[in-house]
Image (tube, helix red, strand yellow):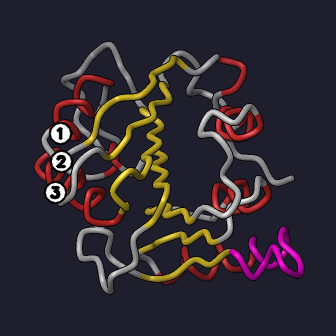
């Protein structure tokens, strides 16, 4: 299995979200598509990676074609699009944010939370990989320093409540990220 970060695959294997089978998943800023592959291989029925860069869409499509065969491949796609301007009425069961939040300018964070509220079904779940949690929070980015309370502040106002928060074990983080990463699960509790 193509693995970028063990914390997501371990989390899915241990059913940290419950059973993801027959669930729809949105992953904005999915890059090469590693997380799309992980969700499909753990049973999600429809996984959409969203990328604004055409080169990223092309690169991720190659990875999906390589890693997923037959029916598994039919459950995954990476499409061009702007996360902040949802098109259509599709609502997802699960959202996964892996360092998308830290890549956007801090002035866009409230819009990020509102967009997640629009993309997810009422009762849906958002999983956030919170990185980089630097001790020096005056560093300018991207990536911009982030921390759990920052996520809580913007997600609370968009109708989410924190279900769980855990520091990622250093051995499960991507190289160089040990001790600077959290995994949080949020439940969408109100309609927007």
Q: Which residue is mark 3?
A: 111
Q: Which range of residues does the magenta coloring cover?
A: 63-75
Q: Which residue is mark 1?
A: 154
User: Is 53 colored magenta in this rendering?
Assistant: no
Where 86 sits versus 39, above or below? Answer: below
Q: Say whether marks 1 and 2 touch (CB < 8 Å).
A: yes
Q: Main secondary structure of the magenta part?
A: helix
Where 134 sits versus 23, above or below? Answer: above
Q: Residue 181 location in percent, x, y?
A: 49, 25
> Along the horizontal axis of the image, is 135 left or right of 47?
left
Identify the disc placed on residue 158. 2
Q: Residue at x 70, y 46 (%)?
A: 4
Give the structural element (helix, strand or loop) at label 1.
helix
User: What separation in Å lies between label 2 and label 3 (alpha carbons)?
Assistant: 9 Å
Q: Residue 34 location in percent, x, y?
A: 68, 58
Task: Point out the frontmost of discs 2 and 3.
Answer: 2
Q: Nearer the viewer, residue 102 or 14?
A: 14
User: What separation in Å lies between label 3 and label 1 (alpha carbons)?
Assistant: 9 Å
Task: Point out the frontmost of discs 1 and 2.
Answer: 2
Which label's residue is closer to the chain start, 2 or 3?
3
Q: Residue at x 31, y 25 (%)?
A: 147
Q: Residue at x 45, y 35 (%)?
A: 185
Q: Quadrant of residue 60?
A: bottom right
């Amino acid at each position: 299995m193509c693995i970028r970060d063990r914390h997501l695959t371990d989390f899915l294997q241990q059913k940290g979200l419950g059973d993801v089978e027959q669930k729809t998943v949105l992953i904005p800023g999915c890059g090469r598509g590693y997380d799309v592959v992980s969700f499909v291989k753990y049973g999600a029925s429809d996984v959409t990676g969203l990328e604004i860069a055409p080169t990223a869409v092309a690169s991720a499509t190659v990875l999906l074609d390589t890693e997923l065969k037959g029916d598994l491949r039919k459950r995954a796609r990476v499409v061009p699009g702007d996360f902040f301007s949802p098109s259509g009425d599709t609502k997802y069961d699960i959202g996964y944010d892996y360092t998308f939040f830290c890549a956007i300018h801090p002035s866009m964070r409230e819009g990020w939370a509102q967009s997640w509220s629009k993309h997810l079904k009422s009762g849906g779940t958002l999983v956030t990989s919170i990185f980089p949690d630097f001790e020096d929070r005056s560093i300018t980015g991207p990536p911009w320093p982030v921390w759990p309370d920052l996520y809580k502040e913007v997600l609370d106002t968009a109708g989410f409540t924190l279900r769980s928060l855990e520091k990622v074990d250093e051995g499960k983080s991507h190289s160089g990220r040990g001790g600077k990463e959290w995994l949080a699960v949020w439940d969408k509790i109100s309609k927007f």
